Image (cartoon, rainbow, N blue to C red):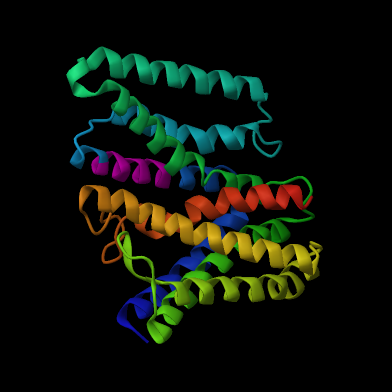
């Protein structure tokens, strides 16, 4: 086993039980944790932008990154059952304030349009996309907290397995590169290995974990889910590599000592979580 794989397994051994407990608790605890990681992820995006010559408006971005999961939970019935219109109005007010602040503090030569765009992107990407986890955890259609926790872990487990098998398959088989410019270590063999692993594991997870907890998803739908989620995760991984390559850095930050930044650890999940929420909503599961 490679050193990188060993580190990933060690991190997973600690992170998975902690994540299990936090997801089971759900509520404001989970929303607050997503908000913290949202701020940290947005900060890394803004630092990447600064290396590229764009100076965002960080305070406004942090407010948005933290506000999206907190307001998102407040809208849910398990939260405050806040009317959606108030959330929309609050988001609109935040956007207006962001643009007003950016344009008031930067001359045209300081690229205010790019600054406002990057600030909004960082908040939505780092705080908004993972907030869909709350929809999975607090759906009224799910029979129990443990069942909801199992649903949340379905895409998380598939992503971890896909990532691990893609690394192992690429190392063992080699072959043509998947994205040689953006991520030279990734191969087509690795991508296929990861996707096949997710496709095979999804129905097994459904039968062994979800069904006993009262969550019924057909085998065919789980096969589709595994395939789509695996592809979304790998695209998210490459997309994050693109952000780093644009400014010439290896890691987005150092939030996790020895493992890079928040963007580095959650790159796949930024795409996987909202994709999973969309699919499971279409399936009628959440």
Tell me if I can see residue 110 in this picture.
yes
Tell me if I can see residue 266 in this picture.
no
Residue 264 percent across, percent down from the top left: 35, 58
Residue 270 percent across, percent down from the top left: 48, 50
Name the residue rendered at 34%, 25% in the picture.
116
Name the one closer to the observer, 231 or 72. 231
- Is residue 262 found left or right of 104 in the rendered image? right
Q: Quadrant of residue 144?
A: bottom right
Name the residue rendered at 50%, 59% in the picture.
233
> Is 212 rendered above or below residue 173?
above
Name the residue rendered at 47%, 70% in the picture.
163
For the stretch drawn in magenta, what is the main secondary structure? helix
- Is residue 6 found left or right of 48 in the rendered image? right
Residue 171 percent across, percent down from the top left: 38, 82
> Is 17 rendered above or below residue 233?
below
- Is residue 89 found left or right of 241 in the rendered image? right
Q: Quadrant of residue 258?
A: bottom left
Residue 209 percent across, percent down from the top left: 72, 71
Name the residue rendered at 33%, 83% in the picture.
2
Quadrant (top left, top right, bottom left, bottom right) of the N terminus: bottom left
Magenta stretch, residue numbers: 36-48
Q: How many marks?
A: 0
Is residue 54 shown in magenta?
no
Is residue 44 shown in magenta?
yes
- Is residue 139 found left or right of 42 in the rendered image? right
> Is 13 rendered above or below residue 66?
below
């Amino acid at each position: 086993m490679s050193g990188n794989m060993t580190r990933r397994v060690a991190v997973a051994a600690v992170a998975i039980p902690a994540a299990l407990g936090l997801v089971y608790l759900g509520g404001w605890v989970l929303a607050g944790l997503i908000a913290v990681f949202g701020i940290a992820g947005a900060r890394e995006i803004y630092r990447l932008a600064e290396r590229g010559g764009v100076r965002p408006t960080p305070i406004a971005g942090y407010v948005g990154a933290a506000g999206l999961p907190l307001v998102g939970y407040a809208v849910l019935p398990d939260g405050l059952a806040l009317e959606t219109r108030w959330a929309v109005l609050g988001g609109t007010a935040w956007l207006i304030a962001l643009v007003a602040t950016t344009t008031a503090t930067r001359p045209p030569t300081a690229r205010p349009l790019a600054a406002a765009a990057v600030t909004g992107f960082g908040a939505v990407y780092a705080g908004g996309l993972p907030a869909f986890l709350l929809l999975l955890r607090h759906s009224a259609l799910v029979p129990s907290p443990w069942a909801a926790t199992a649903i949340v872990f379905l895409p998380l487990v598939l992503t971890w397995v896909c990532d691990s098998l893609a690394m192992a398959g690429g190392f063992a088989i080699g072959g043509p590169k998947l994205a040689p410019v953006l991520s030279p270590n990734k191969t087509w063999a690795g991508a296929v290995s990861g996707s096949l692993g997710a496709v095979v594991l999804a129905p097994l997870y459904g039968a062994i974990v979800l069904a006993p907890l009262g969550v019924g998803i057909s085998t065919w739908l789980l096969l589709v889910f595994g395939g789509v989620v695996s592809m979304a995760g790998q695209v998210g991984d490459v997309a994050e590599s693109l952000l780093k390559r644009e400014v010439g850095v290896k890691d987005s930050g150092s939030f996790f000592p020895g493992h890079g930044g928040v963007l580095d650890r959650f790159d796949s999940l930024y795409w996987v979580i909202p994709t999973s929420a969309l699919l499971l909503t279409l399936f009628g599961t959440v």
